[in-house]
Amino acid sequence: MILKHLKTSIRNFRRHRIYSTLNILGLTIGLTTSFLILLYVQHESSYDRFHKDANRIHRVTMSFKNGDAYTTTTTSPYKVAPMLEEHFPTIESTLRLFYTFNDRSEIIYNSQSTEITDWFTFTDPNLFSFFSFKLLYGDEESALTKPNSIVITQSEAKKLFRDKDPTGQLVTFRNIYDGTQTNLTVTGIMEDMPVNSHIPYRYYISMKTKENLSRGMTTSWGWTSQNNYFKLKEGADIAAIKNRLTDVVKLSTPEWFQNWAYLDTQPLLDIHLHSNLKEEIRPGGNVTYVQMLSTIAFFVLLIAAINYMNISTSLASSRMKEIGIKKIVGADRRHLVMQFLFESFLLLIVALMTSIALIQFILPDFSQLVGRQLYIDNIPLIYFGYATLIVLVLGLISGSYPALFLSSFKIVSALSVDRYRFGKKAAAFRTGLVILQFVISSFLICSTLVILNQWDYLKNRALGLDTEQIISITLPSRSAQGNYEIFRNGIIGQSDVLEVGTCSKEMTGWYDNFGIFSYQGLEYSVPIERADKHFFEAVKIELVAGHYFQGSPADSNAIVLNEKALIQLGINDPIGEVINANDKEYKIIGVVKDFHFEPLYTELGPIVFFKAVSGANYVYAKLNMSNIGETISGIEEVWNELNPGRIMDYSFVDSEIERAYQSEKQFFGVFTLFSALAILIACLGLYGLVTFSVSLKIKEIGIRKVFGASTKSILALLSERFFILILISNLLSWPLSFYAMSRWLQKFPYRVDFSLTILIIGTLISLGISLFVIGARSLRASSLNPVSALRCD
């Protein structure tokens, strides 16, 4: 019986090869798109869930005053952990990870150095009992107990020691900035960090080592460089911790800390997707993007399903005589129902198998596109169950209509039914599906336009400073910073080096230094940076009043502010005005125009500049790009003379700014791609429906041509109904597009306006694409020979 159904199905697919191809193509694209997005969503949702007690682990966050608002960071004081253990009996244990971002350091073994900046941390001894990281060699309880102990991940150990047994080996930890060195003993080797961990470190040094290196950290509430985690006891309520935390902070901390900051908590499982805080250990995900891509996956699958159902129901009328003949030769209703359902499931299985093969082929490219390491074997089995369920439901829905409805016809009715009249019976159902399909398509087109406009806005918004033709050079050590003037003088003489200045802040980094300034009895927390006058000139920050630093002894107590800082401090006549910071008076010598010194995720705020006594963390050089290769080589020659053995670390500022929006760029690209695929599927379905509509009216077209109808009138006849449906769909999508994308734009402090123009352009694009598809098929029909048309059955 199955073999018989298979032969009949294959014969029917060949007979309707255009429709079968459209169905398989649409379903394959829909399933592939949905599964790829599912892989991404599953990966993003899996972060930190491998920890045994993940639901009981939380992180302390700290919010501190930043002007009139608060800035929230992932780090908090070293003393928070003992405070929590003392005052909250429902806390089982605490753990600290020292935040070491941009702390330039290296490991030296056998005279070979390996820079480990951003890849190391100091941590408490209970790392392996707190988290579910696996120690391969060494003792979990004692590996990080003693000073000068280090645990290394397996892959890093292989790089350092090759075939040697790493345990017990001595390595040297060197701070690149000040040159201090500490000998460490390798006490353990651990598994590499899972890709879905928010903790990326590869070198774990005992906290006792850090305490010996920085003795003030154990007693000062100002030492706020730790990620403090705590684990609740079984059944404990986090709400009770949150409710008492403010009172405990008041009881345990000095008054200045209470006036400056407050603490809160954050679940471990929220860190990757729901956290966008300063000083994250690694860049997190974005729950909004995950939700939007999940919506796209649903829409794409829905459009593919609508296509399938539309074409299936459209073809039903062409099989009436087949049904009648089969009934004459003895086929009962059960047999006919099974035949239609078998055909439906067979086509879906072909699409599913093609989709799985396609996913394996394009997954590496998709992983690169979204910036994640995705593997199909990482998907839990339950997701394959969902995929099977989707196929079953889709097969039942799309196959049930022809199976149950057509098989119910009596023999005489089946053999005598007017195909055109029958086609009209299902027209209302198909019309509703077409409208739904193009409401979704129009929504995706308008959404894509908004997203592309926002991306273009982020890339091209005026920042208030020049970023073109400027390189940023890192000064990693105290000696490199001390040699800044020599370095500057050595390269400023080159013909293609236009200006060179220094500043303590990376162009796309976050503010991490704040000062408490008092003016007229009021205190304000404001970001502070160090710079020389050449920095302002190199990046062309506009001077509003006064002057830059002049290089005189008076600069030691001079400051330059931006306009926002003046507004916050309430200073009307700033030049020469004196404000206090840390019991010292500073004179305002200059005011600069506001400029963006952080990514556009945050609103422009106040900033105060002090004079850089020597070189700060970064050198900014304005270059003539006509001969950039030789210019960079000349700068490197000067660098190598002053910093032998240390490679010059530089980058172009405009490239840095583009990298700052890498996650947005990836999302916008993925959203645009999948929106285009959804629209393609809709167009495939539209082509199928137009083809079916033409087949119903083929004799009418022939008669009209005999009576002199023009190609233009034939095109109008075939296109008018679809044009009206698509226009209605676009108008219906307007409120949805406006509501959804307006809400999305609210997440950006700086954003484009959602105007009626976007909706109109989106509608025109939708109509243009649709008319192209309709016109291409209709034009072919309108050019058909009338004799051939009248012979068609």
Image (tube, helix red, strand yellow):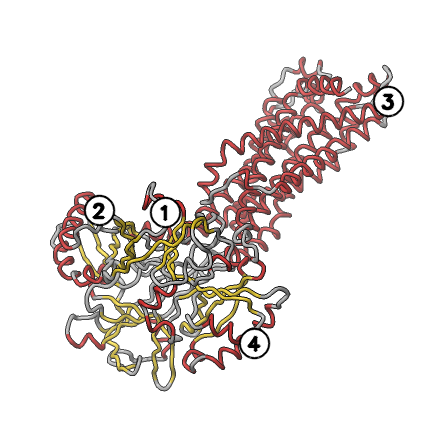
Q: Nearer the viewer, mark 2 or mark 1?
A: 1
Up the image or down, 217 lies above or below 99; here it is below
Mark 3 or mark 2, earlier in chain: 3
* Quadrant of the image containing the N terminus: top right
Q: Nearer the viewer, mark 4 or mark 3?
A: 4
Cβ atoms at labels 4 and 1 below 8 Å apart: no
Task: Give the residue at mark 2.
Answer: 625
Q: Nearer the viewer, mark 3 or mark 1?
A: 1
Mark 4 or mark 3, earlier in chain: 4
Mark 1 lies on a secondary structure that is helix
Q: Sort mark 1 into few (<14), some (14-19) or many (20+) by Cα contacts within 10 Å.
A: some
Q: CA distance from mark 4 to mark 3?
A: 74 Å
Q: Sort mark 3 into few (<14), some (14-19) or many (20+) by Cα contacts within 10 Å.
A: few
Task: Give the residue at mark 4.
Answer: 244
Q: Position of residue 735 (x, y in %)?
A: 61, 53
Q: Nearer the viewer, mark 4 or mark 1?
A: 1
Residue 332, numbered circle: 3
Q: CA distance from mark 2 to mark 1?
A: 39 Å
Amino acid on which the number 3 mark rests in the picture: Asp
